[in-house]
Amino acid sequence: MVKNANAPCDLMLFGALGDLAQRKLFPALYQLERAGLLAQGSRILAIARTKATTADVREQLFEKLRYHVKDREFDAGVANVFLQRVDYLLLDFTDPEGYGALREWRDEPNNELIVYMATPPSMYGVIARNMKATSCCNEKTRVVVEKPIGHDLESSRVINDELGEVYHENQLFRIDHYLGKETVQNLIALRFANNLFASQWDQNHISHVEITVAESVGIEGRWGYFDQAGQIRDMIQNHLLQLLCLIAMDPPADLSADSIRDEKVKVLKALKRIAPDMMDRYVVRGQYTAGTSNGKPVPGYLEEDDANKGSATETFVALKAEIDNWRWSGVPFYIRTGKRLPEKLSQIIIHFKPAPHYIFDPDQKHLANNKLIIRLQPDEGMALKILTKDQGLDKGMRLRQGPLELTFSETFEAERIPDAYERLLWEVMKGNQYLFVRRDEVEYAWRWVDEIIANWRDSGEPPKRYAAGTWGPVASIAMITRDGRSWYEDA
Ligand code: BG6
């Protein structure tokens, strides 16, 4: 159901005064305006529970845009044109009576309607039911929801059922903002447009894969939410498993949403379950203590504002995932993510196997494998580490490893790299679901993660400590060295 994105659309944004809307969604919509991608006649209804007028909200949004949009990309004229599209509605989301105002707001009932629920997931069902009961939506309405979809398989089913009672799966756009990142989409191009890699992408040629999503920030005032979730629900269940799927999936028949999502689901189904007796070797969870970040002292997780001093919530997870299928048999995927690590860095490293017969100096044998480094952030790009002969008459056939480097900002200089939400909102307007997560993906991901969480709960073992500003508990290094390997930055 790919639509003409230039047709005007009405966007109803629930939770319009919340952090996500102000920090990400309005700046992304402003960028679409700046790029000329918002059709004439497209309008936005900002909906929230705070008493305010449209004029107040426009004024507040102007300031937020000025703050969140980069100086060189902020144009007051464009911002004002954009804000003319925005109206504000005060609404108690649980009160069906109030929803009549939504219908009245629509000048052109034939315009495409997008409903964005930037609210806690507990509100999704209520909003969906009230929209339906007051005939504010129909079978063409597109609905965007944010993670987390539940906190385990069972609760995600409840939320998905509630949404499913009102909307068909092809109307639902579940966001995982990692899928909107430019380099994440590039994984699809890299793998399926370059036969060079396509033919090497399996257990015959790849020894192991590393996926690291590190953040230097701590909890940033989100303690209440985060302590209920922990790093495994907040990051692994969604962002990291999506990255793993894009690396591991089989070639889709085409680029349609369902072809891609069918292949991702096959990967999730093939994830080897991590049984209780495997936990020691396969999973490490950590929690940061006081340390330093960017040269400044920072408190530990339990000393953050509003902290529950007895919390056993993890802020770091490292694990070894295995995929039980022909392509990946025997190839571990080492995955690692945490808060208060030394830097903000997301990267994937594909370690290729060495050539079958080695003929160079024995002391250089450890160099003899190619690596493909895919940098998601910062400095989006790719580097292929290849071996060449060292230069100089005296060097004989000494080897050296150097990168074939592609840094997007340098190579494609003129291109601005759009923020993930710009891409995702644009795809929703086009009605294209390929960058959104289907119900079965969410549920298979929970099934795998739930078992790990249950194992932690049953063992009663607390998370291992690591000082803020380090790469996590030493046990995460031991986990990979036990297999005769090391994390990329330790190598
Ligand atoms: C969010 C998590 O989904 O992703 C946050 O809830 C995390 O805890 C954020 O900080 C990381 O996103 P990015 O795009 O900054 O890597």
Image: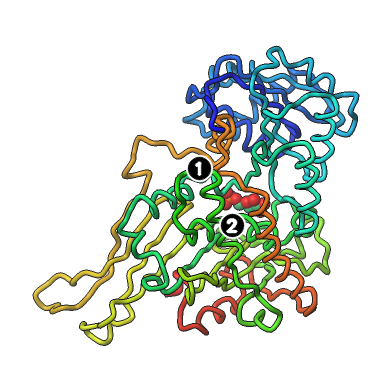
The kind of residue on which mark 2 rests is Val
Mark 1 to mark 2 CA distance (whole Å): 14 Å
Residue sitting farthest toward the bottom: 362
Q: Earlier in the sequence, mark 1 or mark 2?
A: 1
Q: Which residue is mark 1?
A: 256
Where residue 198 appears, x then y in whole percent?
A: 36, 59
Where residue 290 appears, x then y in whole percent?
A: 68, 67
Please identify the quadrant where the C terminus is shown: bottom left
Q: Is residue 350 above or below residue 168?
A: below
Along the line of sight, which residue is nearer the eye, 52 or 470? 52
The kind of residue on which mark 1 rests is Ser
323 sits left or right of 99 in the view:
left
Q: Which residue is mark 2?
A: 265
| Residue at (43% x, 64% y) in the render | 349
Q: Dividing the picture into quarters, in which one does residue 462 lie?
A: bottom right
29 sits left or right of 412 in the view:
right
Q: Is residue 337 above or below residue 163?
A: below
Q: Say whether marks 1 and 2 touch (CB < 8 Å).
A: no
